[in-house]
Amino acid sequence: MNKKEESKAKKLLLMGSSAFNAKELPDEVKERIDEAIARGMTIIVGEAFGACRRFQDYLSSKGYRNVVVGHAVKLRYNAGNWKDFQYGRNLKERERGMIEDCDSAIIIWVNNSGVIAENLELLKRLRKPTFLYEYSTETDTSKAGELDSKRTYDPFYYVKEYYKKQKSQPKT
């Protein structure tokens, strides 16, 4: 995220794969969260298993209070007893709502998960500055960096969006 984007960013989204089962967050991710905390950003975080729970546990260990836990039907986890907000009635609505509400994001993506791939495409399309931490359990390798606007994370994203629009239009 460059300095101009940084000065405008007020809400940071933390999102990631449920398959993320490391005991703690990667150092690169913790550094960026610490920067957001130092800047007093509002942090939006999910409550699913995996990465979201690690994010919450980390924020709680820091005693950070400017956190909103996004959920769908019911709240499953809230490590810091923070404010919560229902972003939708199901997983897709929740994640889309959280993405639309943020100014920037930190994403943990494990094994090219399809749900996260779709979210990365949406973040890319909305031009939200995003730090991506990718991990493969097969090769035990990781890489981290800014979201690549030229890379295709979900090759079927635009087809899915097309059919979603077709479905929602009234029949004549």
Image (cartoon, grey):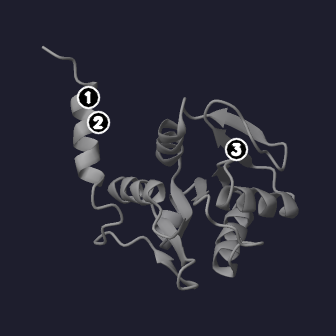
- Give the image location of residue 81, x and y in percent: 84, 43
Q: CA distance from mark 1 to mark 2?
A: 5 Å
Q: Residues within 10 Å of mark 2 (few under 14, many from 20)?
A: few
Judged from this view, the residue extending furthest toward the left is 172
- Give the image location of residue 144, x and y in percent: 52, 80
Q: Is residue 20 above or below residue 100?
A: below
Residue drawn where x is 40% and y is 54% of the image: 118
- Which comes sooner in the sequence, label 3 or label 2? 3
Proximity of marks 3 and 2: CB atoms separated by less than 8 Å: no
Looking at the rendered structure, the kind of residue marked 1 is Lys
Q: Secondary structure at mark 1?
A: helix
Q: Residues within 10 Å of mark 3 (few under 14, many from 20)?
A: many
* Image mark count: 3
Front-most of residues 26 and 42: 26
The residue identified by callout 1 is 167
Q: Secondary structure at mark 3?
A: strand
Q: Secondary structure at mark 2?
A: helix
Judged from this view, the residue extending furthest toward the top is 172
> Can you tell which of label 3 and label 2 is closer to the viewer?
2
Residue 98 occupies which quadrant of the picture?
A: top right
- Give the image location of residue 25, x and y in percent: 71, 72
- Give the image location of residue 32, x and y in percent: 64, 72
Looking at the rendered structure, the kind of residue marked 3 is Val
Residue drawn where x is 52% and y is 58% of the image: 104
Residue 36 occupies which quadrant of the picture?
A: bottom right
Front-most of residues 49 and 39: 49
The residue identified by callout 3 is 68
The residue identified by callout 2 is 164
Front-most of residues 79 and 7: 79
Q: CA distance from mark 3 to mark 2?
A: 28 Å
